[in-house]
Image (cartoon, rainbow, N blue to C red):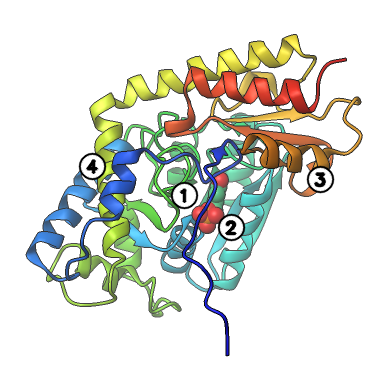
Amino acid sequence: MTTIPKPLDLPTRLLHGPGPSPVAPSVLEALSKPCIGHMDPEFMRVMNEVRQMLQAVFETENEMTLACSGTGSAGAEMLADNLVEPGDKCLVAINGVFGGRFAEKCRRAGGEVETIEAEWGQAFDQDELIARIDEVKPKIMMIVHAETSTGVHQPVDRLAEAVHKHGGLLILDCVTSLGGLPVKIDERGVDAAYSGTQKCLSCPPGLAPVTLSERAMHKVQNRKSKVNSWYLDLTLVGNYWSGNRAYHHTAPVNMNFALHEALRLVLEEGLENRISRHRRVHEKLKGELAERGFEYASDPKNSLPQLNLIRIPARVTDEAGARAKLLKEHGLEIGGGLGALAGKCWRIGLMGHGAHEENVEKIVAALDDVVPVS
Ligand SMILES: *Cc1c(COP(=O)(O)O)cnc(C)c1O
């Protein structure tokens, strides 16, 4: 007979890696409310409010704004699958893990993918991007706003104009920027964007906010071939989120409750206040780290406040061991480096509910214990 495991008894963690981020108690409470039907009029109201709040956080009036079921990667796939038609020329900017993944999604959707690359840890110069856009004339251009793998903030305010000049659409990965940096979807002319719940929105992982402009939806509605994915087909999912409310799939009801509360918290604090809090707390961490000889590995002009990429100092001989000790003895999770940065860098997240001065104090105290200066 199989032995039945005991009910879960989990340690409390200080989540300061690349996500998930710490979740506020009221969000956990919303998550544990009694489940209701996914076609219940009360749930429809929840969906409407989630959409309205997502519009406010994305700073858009796009009607097609919803929480795709699945994590951030599902949102990325929703946009690639719906917006890329076989044979479409796509231009994907790669300076970390997530651009590379999007390029692969475009290829799988039948796109002809061109890339432009920058060194990991560096932002792209917009003039170089625009020159490449003029050369490739892409139907789809995609770039990551906040590269969580490298801690880089990518300026994107001038790209849409260049992409639109050639009749293309600009897709922005806002997984780590939404709720932590201004994304300004409408002002910047971004045609479609996706995010995730577990970064600066500080909700557990499980939903992917997405938004598409009318131009982007025009492309989806006039496709020559059907969207390859049935589950992520926006003409079907969109009808469930608005339109005729036709059953498509069972929305993760309680995750939508949690997102509802997480978004409420963002708007109660005020988007601008929240963004400046991220900046202020980042400055504090930066100062504390500098005093201890830690250096940033990301381009200092374009460092993300919510994701700090730091070089592992020479005094640390066993970086994985040090991170394991931080977790075991201090309950502190920080991220290791990804790809080319593995073993060289650490990633310290200060996202959403975790971006507070007292969290910085806890992080610094743990580092002082595990990797002391002398
Ligand atoms: C976390 C992340 C993703 C992927 O999201 P998942 O929720 O892990 O599927 C995509 N892009 C960026 C920039 C991210 O930080």
Q: Are marks 1 and 3 in contact (CB under 8 Å)?
A: no
Q: Helix, strand, or loop for circle 2?
A: helix
Dot 2, crowdedness within 10 Å: few (<14), some or many (≥20)? many
Residue beneath the point at 33% across and 53% down: 212
Instruction: Return the residue at label 1.
Output: 171
Q: CA distance from mark 1 to mark 3?
A: 25 Å
Give the mark nearer the N terminus: 3 vs 2. Answer: 2
Mark 1 or mark 4: which is in front? 4
Identify which amino acid the numbered label 2 is placed on.
Answer: Phe
Identify which amino acid the numbered label 3 is placed on.
Answer: Ala
In the picture, measured across the screen, residue 10 lies left or right of residue 285, that is: left
Q: CA distance from mark 3 to mark 2?
A: 18 Å
Q: Are marks 2 and 4 in contact (CB under 8 Å)?
A: no
Instruction: Return the residue at label 4.
Output: 53
User: Quick check: 64 above or below 121?
Assistant: below
Q: Helix, strand, or loop for circle 1?
A: strand
Tell me where residue 121 sits by quadrant.
top right
Image mark for residue 102: 2
